[in-house]
Image (tube, rainbow, N blue to C red):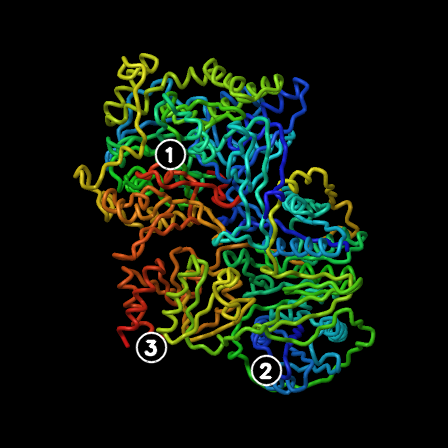
Amino acid sequence: MKICVLIKQVPDKDSSLNIADDHLTLVENNITWVSNESDNYALEEALLLKEKHGGEVIACTLGKDSAKQVLKDALAKGADRGIFISDSSFENLDILSLGKVISSTLEKENFDLIMTGLQSDDQGNSQLGLILAELLNMSHGTLVMGTEIMGDSTIKVKKELEGGWFQWTKLSLPASISIQSGINSPRYATLKGIMMVKKKPVDEVTAGDVSFDALEPKVSINKIYVPDKTKETQFIEGSPEEISEKLVEIFKNDIKVLN
Amino acid sequence: MKILVYIQQDQGKINTVSLEALKGAQEIAAQTGGTISALSFNSDVTSQLAGYDLAEVLLAEDDKLNTFNPLFYLKALEDIAKAESPDIIVFGHSYEARDWAPRLSARLDIPLISDCIGFKKEDKLTFIRSIYQGKLNSDSVVNNGAFIVSFQSGAFRADGLQSGSAEIRNVTVDLSAVNDSISPEEKFQEAEQAVDLTQADVIVSVGRGIGKEENIAMVRELSKTLGGEIAASRPVVDAGWLESSRQVGSSGQTVSPKLYLALGISGAIQHVVGMKGSKNIVVINKDANAPLFEIADYGVVGDIFEIVPKLISGIQDSQ
Amino acid sequence: MTEETRQVLDVDVLFVGAGSASLAGALHLKRITSKAGLDISIAIIEKAREVGAHSLSGAIIDPRTLNELIPDHLEKGVPFEAEVAEEHMYYLSSKSKFRFPYLPKSMSHHGCYVASLGQFTRWLGKICEQEGIDIFCGFSGSELLYENEKVIGVRTGDRGIDKHGKPKSNFDLGVDIHAKATILGEGTRGSLTKTLINKFNLMQGKNPQVWAIGVKELWQMPKGSIKPGYVAHTMGFPLGHDIFGGAFIYGMKNDILDLGLVMGLDYKDPSIDSHHELQLLKTHPWIRSLLKNGKMIAYGAKSLPEGGYFSLPKLTVDGAMLIGDSAGFMNGQRLKGIHLAMKSGMEAAETILNALQKNDFSDSTLSDFQNRIDKSWIKTELYKVRNFHQAFDYGLIPALVNTGLGLLTGGRAWGLLNHLPSKNGHEHLTKLDSGSHSGGNGGNSKYDQLEFDGNYLFDKVTNVYHSATAHDEDQIPHLHVKDTDICIKRCTEEFGNPCKYFCPADVYEMTGEDNNRRLQINFSNCVHCKTCDIMDPYQIIEWVPPEGGDGPAWVNL
């Protein structure tokens, strides 16, 4: 099985986010960069499939220079090689355009499976997996909570539906699946794994290698900002006793959930 | 400006998020002078839709569209988009929409701005998205051409939909060439006791701030004292401290109780989307910067371990 | 998991801890061995998820070692904040400040650089990796491996064990790393270092080590308001005359103000709380004015070895060496240890080269390290301040007199004595019933005035939130308290459970009432400062590394 896992480098959830003067980017000096959470689960799922069915796992990322770390971490955990897509001209592209860049890179590889995390913890578009499925003519599934290979040409995925419902879906390979967090327990990179990283190849892809014509972003972000509060929050202060007294009153008289 | 709104349904019942998105479309139309068509693959639904203030209702009927299968739905909408040339296609950002709208974007080669929490009309139509898990917002505009937008649950209120009367028009689609590379099986629920949080008037919900499993007991007590249900954000469920059926959020239940009391929940977007519609939100968290305070009606910056025990006895005393 | 399935990795030289000592040591070792025609494998294990994540200091770095190790460090983009542009020394009363009229040259920071140790070690780590040194992050050193009393390597900690001690599905058994020489650069109060010192009695004939704790906050100030390279140190308020220490205020780039307090862990009153002292500091009108319109963006704490020259242990045993803060190479008077840590690493490297060439890693060869230290400027520098900290046992004024006389006499205590003894820090703690202080079980009354408004003054839990520390909750707590009965039955009465106060991260809590009282350990708050291991009056707390990768994720502390 030839599996590609797309991993994005995002700020750690606990990083304090300060907006730069351009109102478009973040100040980076206080940010800890990590691999996107659901992508870690996708990588683990890919490694489990490889262990069970053989094949290779290729980790792929699109980002700035620091994003190479994401590939190193994946290689340390057992991915076989990496693809690093990076170019300043990709920095402001919308997700559809990025999908085109990535699909043109992955096309020649003829992957059986492309796996992505459900959504990135920064922009959270939640689209890439499906865009790649369309551009590369693959079947797809999203919100995947379980995978099962059936024979040579099919994968069954357990999808999460609304309200606590689930559904198994048969997908013909090649397939692009978006993995939900919590599906497995991501492994640690072992010492041996880290030492092997040096020996594993990482292909670097820039704008010149991409077959789409000069891509203009279809969507532009005008600014990013701290959300305005639309609601007037009434803050209750005091000692725990005073607070709980006031809350009981609110529950009783304002919200009317107590008799 | 032609706006086409896709209305999701399940066995004739309209999905609320789609209705909310329809309201969003009405607001866009009001501000841009556009017309709205609502599209459904189910005739019971189209009859209901005919009672809203829309230019028209489109009905595409085909056996293969009776239950959700992304490739068939895609082809149907592709045919309809080619025929109708909408400027904007609108979805409610539901689980189902996540499973085909982005592919539609690639199919039609028009961008999708997904999971929007609102819009405003500045120079252009500007769509607001919540990014970095609710910590920041972004304003996006489409540079030119048609596009797709999906609205987050709760971005608009369905009860504000303008009523009217609309003609229903049948549209044909050709699904003959669609393959079955995606074949969904039957839906099912997990074997565990399914708690229906959507019916609860009071929900006491607990997040990472609860620290450890043993501390949940006090939350259970509080919820019992209030006559409500206990719920949790994803990390608590992932840790196995509460059953997944108690999870509120984008991958759990969406609730709108009279009282949503959030204890030690910071307010990541995945959780917020599941409880934003609650009538009264009370947030207790020791971090004054917890995003959840943004949507709180009442907020307490404090230690839940000090307050909850007092609250329990305070409620007991009052009854 | 049987022992047979445990992996073994063989390297020539293993460094434990990717701090400035090990990084400098490994880099220098790689270079001198290559030059000598030896191709050796050097590995560094680091418990943090990435190099620099557990590094915390002021810091003002003396570039002396960097000039030796990487002369073109400026061209290589060393991430210093700024060269020290102006320096001030103040004595603070609760409301005013008095400038020190005279600053001796030896205490000046002229020619040094304001820096973030975390950024510095990250930079140094990258250079090490580029030159072929393997740095394994996320691996803690859990025990030393011996063969007949000779250190043969380190066993890394198991990962993926749940809070009941059972392996989780991603369980990863620790690896035995075998090395000809194991160099412990674990930083302050190293856990493996502690076991080595105890096993081989390496402190025999030495002054006990004494530590201080440094707690700091980073403040984002309005644009253009902070001068990078601004340096100020203070004494007096809030610590007073009986507690060693003082504050530091450094200007960093991007309008970040670096504010911290160093406090000796040899105070008498068990209700003293370093975090609260830092908050008290911020009530001073001058400090408050510095923070106007600013926002606190980060918090952290770390202990530092203050004992000086006479508290250095015997530095070597068969197969192992101690460098950096683990040994105690810090100049307490100058408040600088990074250049000394790095130099100690370099001298260790020279020692190892010799050992490699002789193929002899016994103590008789490795102990040459001590000779090298004594012949280098490490001794020259540390010897001059060898009695600095001990004099503070007598109070601030006598200590300042001692410092002055020391400057004149090359370090003689009171201008006369060669060697002032010291006492273990925790032994200074006086019991509650001694009537000698205002502390009690309810905490020290000097903190009553603190109003934690969440803007300038923060309670401990809020600061902990900003310490970017996280631990997998599902693991056995890494703070081992040997007998919690002592906590409940003896300590409460005798010392008032000072762990609640001396821990800057709110790890220790006494919960419950009457017969249900117990010690609660919120280990996931731990910032790895080691204060508890140092200061607990009964010495029953043992800090061991948590699961590799856990702990703070500091970026520029």
Q: Chain of mark 1?
A: C
- The chain identifier of the residue carrying mark 3 reads A
- Nearer the observer, B297 or A183: A183
Disc 2, disc 3: CB below 8 Å? no
On screen, residue B253 versus residue C295, left or right, reads right
Tell me, yes or no, whether the two marked residues, 1 and 2, touch with CB atoms within 8 Å: no
Residue placed most toward the observer, C238 or B44: C238
Residue A257 seen in the current view: yes
Under tag 2, what secondary structure?
loop
Q: Residues within 10 Å of mark 1 (few under 14, many from 20)?
A: many
Question: Which residue bears the numbered disc 2?
Answer: B53
**Comparing marks 2 and 3, which lies closer to the viewer?**
3
- Secondary structure under tag 3 reads loop
Residue C325 position within the rendered picture, expressed as x and y whole percent measured from the top left: 44, 29
Q: Is the residue marked by circle 2 packed among few (<14), some (14-19), or many (20+) residues within 10 Å?
A: some
Q: Nearer the viewer, residue C394 or A29?
A: C394
Q: Check disc 1 and report the residue beneath it.
A: C249
Instruction: Classify B24 as above or below C133.
Output: below
Q: CA distance from mark 2 to mark 3?
A: 40 Å
Front position among marks 1 and 3: 3
**x, y (%) of residue B126?**
58, 62
Q: Position of residue B96 (x, y in %)?
A: 64, 71
Q: Decide: few, some or many residues near mark 3? Use Cα within 10 Å; few <14, some 14-19, many ≥20.
A: some
